[in-house]
Image (tube, grey):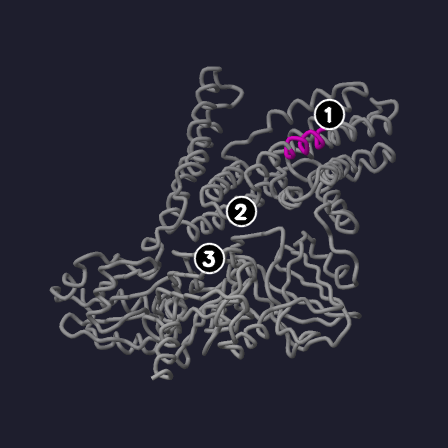
Amino acid sequence: MILFAALALALHNAPLPLGTGHVQAVLVAEHASAVPGKDILLGVRLRMEPQWHVYWRNPGDAGFAFAARWTTVEGARIDSLSWPVPDSIPVEPLMTYGYHDSVLLPFTAHLLPGAKAVHLRAQAKWLECKEVCVPGKADLALDLPVGATPGPDTVSALFASARASMPGVPAGWKARAARTDSGIVLLLTGAGTTPKAARFYPADPGVVDNAPSQVVEPIADGFRLRMRRDPFQRLTPDTLRGILVRDGEWPGGAKGWEIRVPLALAQVQDTARIAAGASSPGPGGGGAGLVVALVLAFAGGILLNLMPCVLPVLSLKAFSLLAGREERPLVHGLAYAAGTVASFLGLAVALLVVRGGGEALGWGFQMQSPRMVGALSVLMALVAFSLWGVFEPGTSLAGLASNSVRGLGGSFLTGVLATVVATPCTAPFMGSAMGWALVQPAPSVLAVFSSLGLGLSAPYVLISGIPALGRFLPRPGAWMETVKQFLGFPLAATAVWLAWVAGRLAGADATATVGLLWVFAGLGAWILGRGALPHKSAWSRNLSRLAFLVLAGGSIAFAAARLPSRASLAAASTTSTEIFREGTLSDLRASAKPWFLVFSADWCLSCQVNERTSIEIPSVQEALRARNVRVVHADWTTRDTSIGKALESYGRQGVPLYVLSDGRTERILPEILTPSIVLAALDSVAPRP
């Protein structure tokens, strides 16, 4: 009888596993009881059926992470969950991160000094996936008695395994990180063997391109790991966080190395210096990084002299030197250089002021904001229009150079004028310098812009010191207009890319909106180009300027203020021509026409792979069009009761699900698709007009 009572009490206190499908969750404690004022280790244990998995804190290319919301916490304070080292879950062409079989997600409970008992309640949610994905949930509960000493271990082996799977920091190793235009480089130095293979699991999404392999390159005292950056650049953090795993264990037996290091900006050329063991470029951009930036800025300044709005200024000053109209040519050359440098310093100060306002908002948000990306796209389109001659800001200023103001003051002002007229032409060259400046302190920014000014003035200073070189200057001609117009095409391509990024962030409607804004901005530019010519009346010039401000400026302002702030998930789908709504399934079944019903979700890895490899490809799309198949997309990314009922009608609890009907018979396709499977299924559908 006593034994039966003890067994009943044990069963009453033991947490029961809960789950909604192929994963069971249970809230467990390392000890059977707790001590007031002491800490106790707790955990959420997830047990998965074979071949099923759940996701890590960063799920990768699809999925969403386990999350628990505490509804009752009595007698303790709860720390956040700790995340064990995840597994790679590749499904070409994507990569996700998660756990198979079972995992314990530990956390610490800090017991209050006067606690009489511990009562915990939580609502847990996760995504369980195999070939299909099903959102799972459970209401978790744990009650612990409190005593003078901790109770016996209840699941000691479970917590010992959890401790062994947690990341650590291996003794004797150090990490540094830098980002280039296309990738991220991790430099690992320390005592020990160099791995043949390693993988970095980023804690933050949108930093690393998950799918490609990561390259290990041995160096003298360690190795470096090269990773591709996320192609959509959703995030460029100041700190690189994640877990680094290798073939074998790290010193001390750690399964993974918990990385948290500053992520500095490096030019592509800096990676060799990083590999050599030099200090990684810090936020100050010092050392070789600054030297490289200065050299590139100087070269870019020299190239500015070939722009059609700058070359006439340089040529006219050179001709005045050759004609002997300036008695001290080198002094005049230095005055000209002073004018260009002073002007570029003024631009740098303006940039710093603008950047200061951006940093107050959290600089770096712009490429994550569809509104900012859309506004930049319209601006790039405007610059392309200017290079194509639709309108030409700065051309009239260049004409002032023909006056050739005498004296040192005139040379200084000519340098200022050259900078002013170069400004509309600098977009193809100054983008890298401005991007670099956004993450540097003021001294480095001023130095780089000074180098741009010195590069712009260098040819004229050289001609001033050696006048005989002036005869080798290219003469202005029609070739300059050809160069200018050609440079408009890279800028137009940039505008298109930015519009595509806006679409990725906010759906296809955002891309269409940005394209329409290009039209309005181009119309404003065309009116300005036609109406602001010197021979036009003052009334015409002013009216055309007003039209330009309203149409072009209004287009940029509209993009910045009115584009959607987030994607409409249903509208963003590229595989659907119709969105699933309440009553859609009944309407499809009542129709005699063929239809293809796609149940999917953004967090479903199988869905994403199927859509990229077997649905959104030209051959399948052409087959759907040829048969006049009505394609309907049921997006279950967020909970939708009507979609859930439709899934249940087919005996399914999760996605993906693909149903093809020829108008009479419905056919369920496999969860994992190939192009041949889809095309073979479509062969049963007769082509219709």
Relative height, residue 313 to residue 293 (above, below): above
- Lower sequence index among marks 2 and 3: 3
- Image side of residue 567 versus residue 578, left or right: right
The kind of residue tagged 3 is Gly
Alpha carbon distance from label 2 to label 1: 30 Å
In the image, is residue 291 above or below residue 22?
above
Taking 191 as reference, is 24 left or right?
left
Residue at which label 3 appears: 75
Q: Marks 3 and 1: CB-CB under 8 Å?
A: no
**What type is the residue that disc 1 sits on?**
Thr
Mark number displayed over residue 489: 2
Q: Mark 3 or 1, which is nearer the eye?
A: 3
C-alpha gap between disc 3 and disc 1: 77 Å
For the record, the magenta segment spans 343-352
Label 2 sits on a secondary structure element that is helix
Would you say the magenta stretch is mainly helix, strand or loop?
helix
- Per the image, label 1 sits on a secondary structure element best described as helix
Residue 220 is situated, as x and y percent measured from the top left of the image, at: 80, 70
Give the distance between the C-alpha atoms of the residues marked 2 and 3, in whole angstroms.
66 Å
Query: Could you tell which of marks 3 and 1 lies nearer the N-terminus?
Result: 3
Question: What is the secondary structure assignment of the residue under circle 3?
Answer: loop
The quarter in which the N terminus is drawn is: bottom left
